[in-house]
Amino acid sequence: MIHISDIKVEGFEGPYNFLSNFSEYGFEFRGIYYPTNEHFFQAMKTLDLNKRKYISNLDSPGEAKKIGRQVKLRDDWDDGLKHDVMKKGLYEKFTQNPELTQRLLDTGDAYLEETNFWGDDYWGNATNTDKEGKNHLGKHLMDLRIHLQAREEFAGTQERSA
């Protein structure tokens, strides 16, 4: 059974900004460099390679989000693919930036909640609504942390047995 502690990270700001999709820790995926996970997520909404490249080159994650809202969504986007894309982007961001791997691991077993004031109760938990948010981003980050912890433990086991 997975245990999440009573410690809670609320909001991905300040020392926890690195958890945000808007944080500027880029990564490469299939030959395209994405300066943030937000750029990646928005670009993956389309199958048009030229639009993906265009989105990847936008100056800010806010611009990428704006353009991503305007693209024709791929047919399978809402059939769970958006979660697979988010998980893939997080994996690439954290594994291609090793300092982020350690920072995520350093959150221990804290509950990670993308608390926000802009009304996103799907990927986070909006403070300006009465309903509890789904916090999918926080949950995906905690799942990734568990994966990375297991990888670290396995690597340590391999070193000891060598």
Image (cartoon, helix red, strand yellow):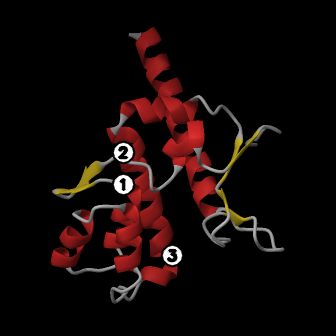
Q: Secondary structure at mark 1?
A: loop
Is residue 15 visible in this depiction of the protein? yes
Choose between 85 and 124: the one closer to the eye: 124
Q: Which residue is mark 1?
A: 36
Among the 4 quarters of the image, the one containing residue 14 = top right
* Front: mark 3 or 2: 2
Q: Which residue is mark 3?
A: 80
Q: In the rendered view, would you say 2 is above or below 77?
A: above
Report, in whole angstroms, how far the alpha carbon at label 1 lies from the one at label 3.
21 Å
Q: Position of residue 61 (x, y in %)?
A: 38, 62
- Give the residue type at disc 1: Thr
Q: In the rendered view, would you say 100 is above or below 12?
A: above
Q: Earlier in the sequence, mark 1 or mark 3?
A: 1
- Give the residue type at disc 2: Tyr
Q: Secondary structure at mark 2?
A: loop
Q: In the rendered view, would you say 12 is above or below 30?
A: above
Q: Position of residue 100 (x, y in %)?
A: 44, 35
Q: Residue at x 36, y 45 (%)?
A: 25
Q: Residues within 10 Å of mark 3 (few under 14, many from 20)?
A: few
Report, in whole angstroms, how far the alpha carbon at label 3 lies from the one at label 2.
25 Å
Q: Are marks 3 and 2 in contact (CB under 8 Å)?
A: no
Residue 137 horizontal side relative to residue 159, left or right: right
Residue 44 horizontal side relative to residue 148, left or right: left
Q: Which residue is mark 2?
A: 25
Q: Position of residue 55 (x, y in %)?
A: 26, 70
Q: Residues within 10 Å of mark 2 (few under 14, many from 20)?
A: some
Q: Are marks 1 and 2 in contact (CB under 8 Å)?
A: yes
Residue 113 horizontal side relative to residue 130, left or right: left
Quadrant in which the N terminus is drawn: top right
